[in-house]
Image: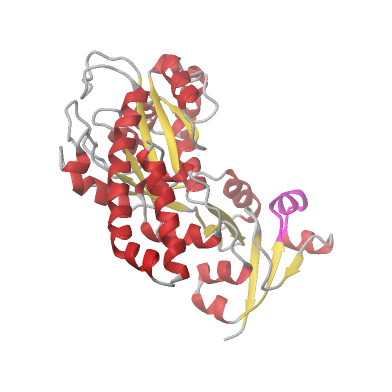
Amino acid sequence: MALKCGIIGLPNVGKSTLFNCLSNVKAQAANFPFCTIEPNVGTITVPDERLNELSRICKPERVIPATVEIVDIAGLVKGASRGEGLGNKFLANIRETDAIIHVLRCFDDSNVVHVDGSIDPIRDKEIIDSELQIKDLETIDSRIAKIQKQAQTGGDKQAKQIYETLSKYKQALEQGKNARSVEPSSKGEEKTVRDLFLLTNKPILYVCNVDEASAVSGNAYVEKVRATLTEQAEILVVAAKIESEIAELETSEEREMFLKETGLSESGVNRLIKAAYKLLALETFLTAGPDEVRAWTYRRGSKAPQCAGVIHTDFEKGFIRAEVIKYDDYIKYGSEMAVKEAGKMSVEGKEYTVQDGDIMHFRFNV
């Protein structure tokens, strides 16, 4: 499932350092602006403790986790919408992603220069918001120019509705609001906006990159971000420097010991990957047996036949039924046979909405 999260931010906020921790793809990280020019793409393994438990029970030949694509996009600067810095190329790279991870610098370090000379995550956020909003306004104005006459002079009801939707979002953007902060009033309005691929309508996660001392409880910069954030979005606190040190450790035992010493229960990278997966509205169903324990990715809200198609298109075409075991039941009873004997396996049809963590067998005929 080729859905991608793009990491954005001003230059020197820690984007590439975080990306290097996330991925085996090593993006250059240096103390100067525009270090990242071409977008780096990494396929990231999604941490899932359930696979370890199922593997312990099934003892499979292989374990295959879910993955998500993360794109490290070069740092934006003020004036990007007018071509400043590397401008429109960066904005085009953002347009190609499905969700945004916005990294904000929330640490002081005189050895790492800031493109604007001082540390202010709210100002940094507003700079990028403004550049994306300007680009979205261009998109909306272009669409309005094409439909305005038809909407105002003709009897085309659909054109009028589209024009009203465009005007509503244009007004919000002109007030400095992101498109995602506007609640669609109908399915038609939602589709109109979705078809525009607005940059500020993409789901977003704010990552506050802090110093080592603030990794557990955050700092005044993080609190400032929390206090001023008006849109519905998650905030994640991560210390990229700590994460880069964890990434250098060879064994899981060393990493666990390091986390314990720093007071963290889980690495920021793991939390970030899980949050990115959630941001993309992705969930996981599982298959388990002696050959393979595997996590399969699907869009939240998918029906059983759609999930069958994730494994193979023939499974969806010839779908008959799905045999479903809840993960907790599998762990409790210790085997598929024991779950069946306890009457805990359900048989579901085409209208079943798959739940995260379902262990599934699909019956099909083609």
Q: Nearer the viewer, residue 311 or 236?
A: 236
Residue 356, placed above or below residue 315:
above
Residue 332 in magenta?
yes
Q: Position of residue 245 (x, y in %)?
A: 36, 26
Picture residue at 29% right of the left edge, 28% below the top: 13
Q: Is residue 96 left or right of residue 350?
A: left
Picture residue at 42% right of the left edge, 67% below the top: 159
Residue segment shown in magenta: 325-335
- Magenta region's main secondary structure? helix
Q: Nearer the viewer, residue 201 or 11?
A: 201
Q: Is residue 37 visible?
A: no
Residue 296, placed above or below residue 309:
above
Q: Residue furthest right?
A: 342
Q: Residue furthest bottom?
A: 366
Residue 21 in magenta?
no
Q: Position of residue 270 (x, y in %)?
A: 47, 37
Picture residue at 39% right of the left edge, 33% below the top: 250
Colouring style: secondary structure
Q: Nearer the viewer, residue 316 or 253?
A: 316
Q: Is residue 17 visible?
A: yes
Q: Nearer the viewer, residue 318 or 332?
A: 318
Q: Quadrant of residue 118?
A: top left
